[in-house]
Image (tube, rainbow, N blue to C red):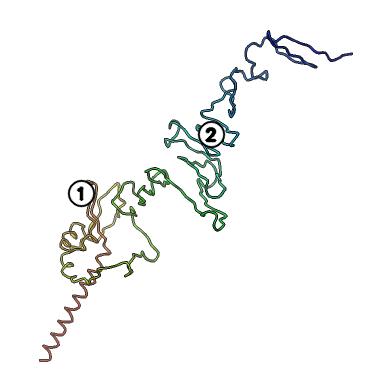
Amino acid sequence: MTTSRTFQTNLASTSTASFNGSANVTPGVTGTLPVANGGTNTSTAFTAGSVVFAGTSGTYNQDNANLFWDNTNKRLSLGNTSSTYSLAISKSSNSGSASGYPSFDVGNTLTTQGDGSSTFNFSTISMSSGNDAVRLFFTSTYAAGTWEPAGIITVVSNHPLKFKTNNADRMRITADGEVWIGYTTDNGSYPLQVNGQIFATNATIATSDIKFKENITPLNKGLEIVNKLKPVTFNFKNDTENNFSEYEEVGFIAQDVDRALSTETFAKSIVKASDDTDPNSTMGLANQNLIPILVKAIQEQQAQIKALEQRIINLENK
């Protein structure tokens, strides 16, 4: 017959412990209690909010500067204990990051739901699985008067937003709002800069409504200007920056047109001068603005033809 007994053992000079039933005690354990025996293998007391992990030799450890749980506000911080976001990932150095800043790797899908105020601050999003490398969807269940339905991508610093394919720059939106397609350097104060040809199914439209115009005056000469122009054929030189055509071209030389229009007040609407402060700046032409001059030249020439026809008629009638 076995009865329960209470045993008392002295753990320290001022401590007692009692066991009611059976107890297994590993002999020879001194100091901190190992993990294998149900301990933490450390004498360190963990602070509130610590996310405990197995460190060296399986010792329980904490690193609140890099991993912290705010149970009061339900926030998880990686490298940022003062965050006000539900999940914050930050880094004090750029070691171990290809982009120079912390990267965010998502196995398949990253989704945010809410009223449009959700914010992701990151350097790189890398999707490592799925048929599509990256998809960005902006959807909402907008109710009138609640919040503005919008997908917003923001660069808060004075740097461009870059778009790459095959690890090469394809498009940039600069901090000044310029859009560069195929360029990595600025070509002047042009909102849209395209390195190559532009294809349009129907037409490209330029603003021409009279309500936007003033000081309207008939063009007073055409043939005089046309006779100064020097149409040429040419080939573009090989250039690593500009995606020039490889075929023989027909057109004008900007410097020639600039000289032909040197006395005209509208010259700057056709000739885009280079920037004297930039050694890489080049001249350009708005060829479409030559059309009014060509039309005027045809009108003047037609008037001359009619005048000559009338002279011939007059001579024949004598």
Instruction: Kindly identify the residue that appears in the image at 23 percent across and 50 percent down.
Output: 275
Residue 259 visible in rendering: yes
Q: Position of residue 209 (x, y in %)?
A: 33, 69
Instruction: Residue under label 2, please give it.
Output: 77
Residue 58 visible in rendering: no
* Relative height, residue 160 to residue 142 (above, below): above
Other residues around mark 2 within 10 Å, as few (<14) / some (14–19) / many (≥20): many
Mark 2 vs mark 1, CA separation in Å = 52 Å
- In the rendered structure, which disc, 2 or 1, sits on the residue that comes first in sequence? 2
**Left or right placement of residue 30 versus residue 185 in this view:** right
**Left or right placement of residue 104 versus residue 309 in this view:** right
Which is more toward the observer, 233 or 121?
A: 121
Q: Quadrant of the C terminus?
A: bottom left
Q: Amino acid at mark 1?
A: Asp
Which is more toward the observer, 86 or 163?
A: 86
Q: Quadrant of the N terminus?
A: top right
The answer to which image quadrant residue 230 occupies is: bottom left
Instruction: Kindly identify the residue that appears in the image at 25 percent across and 53 percent down.
Output: 236
Instruction: Residue under label 1, please give it.
Output: 276
Q: Position of residue 310 (x, y in %)?
A: 15, 85
The answer to which image quadrant residue 71 occupies is: top right
Q: Position of residue 214 (x, y in %)?
A: 27, 68
Residue found at the far front of this picture: 14
* Relative height, residue 181 to residue 286 (above, below): above
